[in-house]
Image (spheres, rainbow, N blue to C red):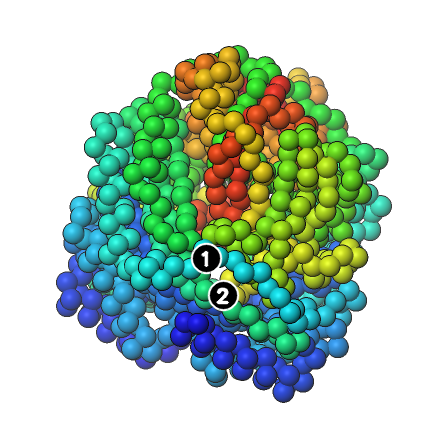
Amino acid sequence: MTEALADVAAEVVEKAVSRGAIFADVRVDRYVITYFNVVDGVVKEVVTGIESGASVRVLYRGVWGFSSTTDLSTMGMLKALDYALASARALSSGRGTSYVCLLPSREDYVKAVVKLSVLDVPFESKVRDVMELYKVVSGRTYVKSATVAYMDGAGESLYVSSDFRVIRQEHMISWMSVSITGREGDRRASISDEVGSADGYTLWSRWPQEELGSVLLKKLEGQLRGSAPKKGLFTVVLAPPAVGVLVHEAFGHLCEADLAMSGSVVKNLRGEVIAREFITIVDDPTLPGGFGTIKYDDEGVEARPVYLVKNGVLTDFMVNREYASRLGVEPTGNARASSYRAPPLIRMRNTILEPRDYELDELLEHVKFGYYLVSISGGETGIDGTFHVGLQEVYEIVNGEICEPVRNLSISGNSLDVLRNAEAVGKDFELHYGRCSKGQTVFVSYGGPHVRVSNVFVSAG
Amino acid sequence: MLVVSDKLLTTAQYAVEKGLQRGADEVEAYASAGTLAEATAENNTLHTASKVIEGGLGIRVVKDGRVGFSYTNSLRNTDVLRAVETAIGVARHTPRDPWWPGLPEKFNRYPKVGGLYSSKLASLGIEEVVECIKEIITLATSRKGLTVVYAGAAVSSGAEVLVNSNGIEVFEEGTLASLSLELAAEDSPITPPAYCFEGSRTEVPDIISITEECIDKALKSVKPISIEGGRYEVLFSPYALDSLIGYALAPALLGDNVVRGKSPLAGSVGELIASPEITIVDDGTIEGGLGSSSFDGEGVPTKRNELIVKGVLKEFVYDSYWGKRGGKESTGNAVRPTYSTLPRVGFNNLIITAGSGSVKSYLSSTEKLLVVDGVRGAHTSVPETGEFSVVTAPTWLVSKGEFEAVKGIAIAGNIWDLIKSTEFISKEVKSVGSFILPWISFSKVTVISKY
């Protein structure tokens, strides 16, 4: 991205201020996107495109005005400013209370840490690599159908604001999702998974096809051959991928300041003990190699770790510039946008439960009968903290041993109860990769160690 | 024809011409452009207003049975040409698809679909959209103890065109206005927020009625009680059905899932698979339908497709690719959410046919049933089997028209068992997204009570 573009953006925010905005910012994105999928062995959809455009946002008399454009000329961007200002003016005759925290000026250029650029890998090689995975997963008679989708994106974003922040950041991610449908006798089942990396074309060195394929097949076999779960309250041991999703989905969202302050169950709990002292949950943008590893967020704010729970105490909410000002806290750098088309929202980055000191054997040994929950297929949480999560890889625990697979199990309850009932935390750690939707979709990471939790409500479905 | 349609048509024609000139055997260009004005409020306060004008073009080219796709978010000729060349480059490296059916051939006749565009709606600016939001907040906050958790109003207008090298050249103009609202009563978060949505292709939906409806639901949701688990009759509102049908049932009616062995209905055409009261139709030609259009994402005319009639499975929906693989014609169900994506099999307006009684009279004459207005976790359903498990909220226990809010309820089961046990289907229907749904009650639903 050129210096000239930064100059145009600076001119736009300056004009915004001279026309009455308290604050203004411009974000410019330019990414090359490659996507393809393999549907039952056929390369079905292949897309290459350039995502390039700019957003203009103004804060005017307590309300926000927003517009975006794909015309990156001075005229195009000034027109977007006109739209944003006109929108804010229309709204400002009502009651608006928004404000932002302003920051010291800063200029920075953050280069992506890349092992092998996705732009240097020929398309045929990417197809060949995905096909190899397809061959592994389709090589069993019970597999009836499989889709593998691959996407990579490489490019740069530019952020310019009226508090004189000029931040350029490079990004390069690759991502893949796999879904497999199986049938054996009259049993039908499906499983899916996602992997990703933030340092270029490194998916296959981290998840070699054979290895990833057998993990996926084991999941599917469990769903086809497993027994039905019992219903009721059980002690469960959660594996890292399940811990990660649960921490993100069932707890993290509640601590996004916009949701928290609109009345989520944690609204008035800052400073309160909500779990035992060995529970620490942090949204950490500094973890190496995560999808949420960023130096600055999409409001040009330095991204710092946020301790949602520190040694059992509910500590901080994740904020953007607006909620930092509203709550009177330091900004955390949690504002993220899916693209130039949308204003940034408060989003998670890498959300994890910190490991402690138990071995898996020790977590299992006191469980007479319970469930070992490995992988989550999806879930949803209400602002009251009630969540419902479906599992796609589960085993029975009998007398401290991991035993037979269980199919179609789900857990539900209130997130705060689950946190309170967390009994012991393992010493291992894994970081996983996925996407999170909140109107817009962004790439996030989540993870943790193994954890034992008592009194979790288990049912079929 | 609006100026924007004319410009889109010229650009799409240019793309197809350049694609053929550059050696493609077949070319298809889909272009769209439009204006969106939107305003939102959070926590009783006006928050963001935006106005965006955007357009772009997606280009699909075929060379020797190899398919490539690219897109551009600029409609300048130089950018369009670059997208055409990129798509051809992509096709060159893509393995041949043995099932590629060719782009659709030219059609002589397209349905006339009314009520999709209103010049009055198209002329509304951000000021009018902002007025809608202000009115909602004034109405809702005039009632003690209510919080507007979220309110959104949006008006969009635009055009889409599709041109292919087989002679298809179609365009359509459309407008859409929508309001959505989330209200919470005083004792939230114990009380789940009430949600309402209203959309129209030709006018701003009635603000008073949507706000009053939402206020009524929010106030009815306070002080929820716990109930015993067990078997209940459960009445699902269109909002609740939208998720449940969308995730657990509808995927089984998509032709690609049938061909790929992912639909539990494959091989069941002609069989009774639902109660005889259930008729499900997909119809892109509904006047003013939120998902209506005279042509689909490949330029194929839309039509009325009867999928389940009086409980008997009749057919599935297809685009041209999966139609060919399944030995069927396209049913006009290639769906294209934006210019930057390839068409996929999807629904235009998925309709469950209305019944005869009114919700109100049914509730006032029934002894004891649960009413569910929203479900969470429907996306964890297993469409291959129809199994689902959801948390429901808001939920009410209703006896002879008296509502009592209920908390801590989950419902689990199989959608194909449920759909065989309908007790009541309302005459009232509601458009939620591109689904048009009545209120439906099912007997003997397994209800789990947890807290």
Residue in view at x 22 percent, y 27 percent:
B144
Amino acid bearing label 1: Leu
Residue B47 image point, x, y percent: 26, 49
Q: Position of residue B194 (x, y in %)?
A: 38, 32
The chain carrying label 1 is B
User: Considering the image in quadrants, where does the C terminus of chain A appear?
Assistant: top right
Q: Amino acid at mark 2?
A: Glu
Residue B68's mark? none
Q: Chain of mark 2?
A: B
Number of marks in the image?
2
Query: Mark 2 Cα within 10 Å, few/some/many (few <14, many 20+)?
Result: some
- Which residue matches tag 1? B116
Question: Residue reaching furthest bottom?
Answer: B21
- Residue A72 position within the rendered picture, expressed as x and y whole percent measured from the top left: 36, 75
Location of mark 2 (residue): B172
Identify the residue at image location x=80%, y=43%. B267
